[in-house]
Image (cartoon, rainbow, N blue to C red):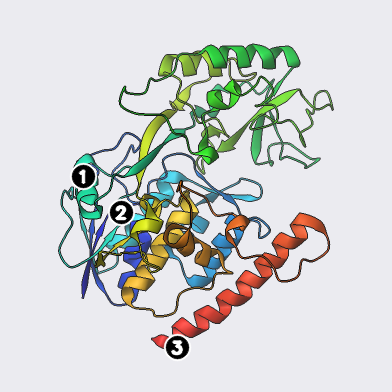
Amino acid sequence: MKVSIVGAGLAGSEAALQLAGSGVEVDLFEMRPGTMTAAHTTGLPAELVCSNSLRSDLLHNAPGLLKEELRRCGSFLMKAADSCRVPAGGALAVDREEFSRTVQKMLYGQELITVREEEVTEIPEGKVIIAAGPLASRPLTDAIGELTGSESLYFYDAIAPVIDFESVNMNLAFFQNRYETEGGADADYLNCPFTEEEYYNFVRELKGGKRVSTRDFEKEIHFQGCMPVEVIADSGDMSLAFGPMKPVGLIDPRTQARSFAVVQLRMENKAGTAWNLVGFQTKLTYPEQKRVFRMIPGLENAEFVRLGSMHRNTFINGPSLLDERMRLKTDDRIMFAGQITGIEGYIESIASGYLAGKLMAGIDVLPPDETAIGAILRYPTRTVTDNYQPSNINYGLFPPLKKKPRGGRRARREAQAERALESLGNWLSVISSEK
């Protein structure tokens, strides 16, 4: 058997490596660098476009549980991410370029994988995994539309700017992790504190800044987990102070007081030369980004390694089109994986690719519903809703506990994680015996 995979993003790369690991030959198609998207900047596989963070690595958070499950399942991209991590407190963040190059070496080092740098405009013959991501080209999107007989859905996603560390004014900014009493250069986050007056001036200019306009025929639909910072500000002057600019858990070492608001920056690469503005996805025009974001205390002379941007993301109505194994109901030789199915996020895409590879390779038993991987499989295939929208992994996608433990929300999450890992272990034993 040979499988064609369309798209060498996170899902496609993981699926290819899982299939090759199972002895299946793969043709992995990637249109970049010959045909670029509105968000990508390289032709490397598994490029991270919005942020370098794969979110929390803590088990009581659903993203942390999903990462741990993938590690236990033998995910190739999780191994790559762990080898390329940069300091980020309780989160897993990576050096983006090193991560992509590590995945590239994995792909080119596998003799059963043939990487083909060419754009796919029609659905290939034979077994296919479509993992083109939410930025699939127009010809491929049209081909998918013809195949499914329905219009693709979409939403808008935004990217945060990245700052050159040498341009940060360290007389104003300080290093500290939230809720940790000790700061200093060993802390993982860089913090820019605001007075009340500075905050309201910033919000006023942010709300009034010129934005990239939407084309006449497009309605703007934002993914709630990646809302542009100026759109958040539109909902109320204090919305940022209670959101991405919340000062809780951060103490300015110069004043020993909590600032009115704080912008945090997270390391973008291992060298520590580039830092991204956490939660500052934006659709401001490039000149306005420079003007407004230089109002942030400590960034008045900021040099931008990369400016933020907004792009349209496309996804199919998974629950109406896919069976429980992510195959097209009308043509079971075709499987969909990754964000094009309506799951959202880096780690979720890796998990979807892992599942696609394993399912296409022929495993019979599906992962238990109690696991995070099971939730990633179930959401785009079995969700019941009249308004299907992208979702990250969250504990709301898991079946409830039969007995709620004492100790509140965190105790419940820890119990769900314990249940998930036990169920995962049993499932891995079953699929291992299938070989």
Percent position of residue 229, x then y: 55, 27
For label 2, the SS is: loop
Location of residue 179 with respect to 376 vertically, above or below: above
For label 3, the SS is: helix
Kindly report the distance in space between the C-alpha atoms of the residues bearing marks 3 and 2. Answer: 30 Å
71 lies left or right of 357: right
224 lies left or right of 46: right
The image quadrant where one finds the N terminus is bottom left
Identify the residue position indicated by label 3 in the image.
433
Is tag 3's residue or tag 2's residue first in the polypeptide sequence?
2
**Looking at numbered disc 1 in the image, what kind of residue is underneath it?**
Asp
Identify the residue position indicated by label 2 in the image.
8
**Looking at numbered disc 3 in the image, what kind of residue is underneath it?**
Ser
Disc 3 vs disc 2: Cβ atoms closer than 8 Å? no
Nearer to us of marks 3 and 2 is 3
- Residue at image position (48%, 55%) is 348
The quarter of the picture where residue 328 lies is bottom left
Location of residue 289 with respect to 75 vertically, above or below: above
Q: Nearer the viewer, residue 110 or 74?
A: 74
- Residue at image position (51%, 27%) is 163
Disc 1 vs disc 3: Cβ atoms closer than 8 Å? no
- Residue at image position (41%, 40%) is 49
Residue 142 — which label?
1
The quarter of the picture where residue 153 lies is top left
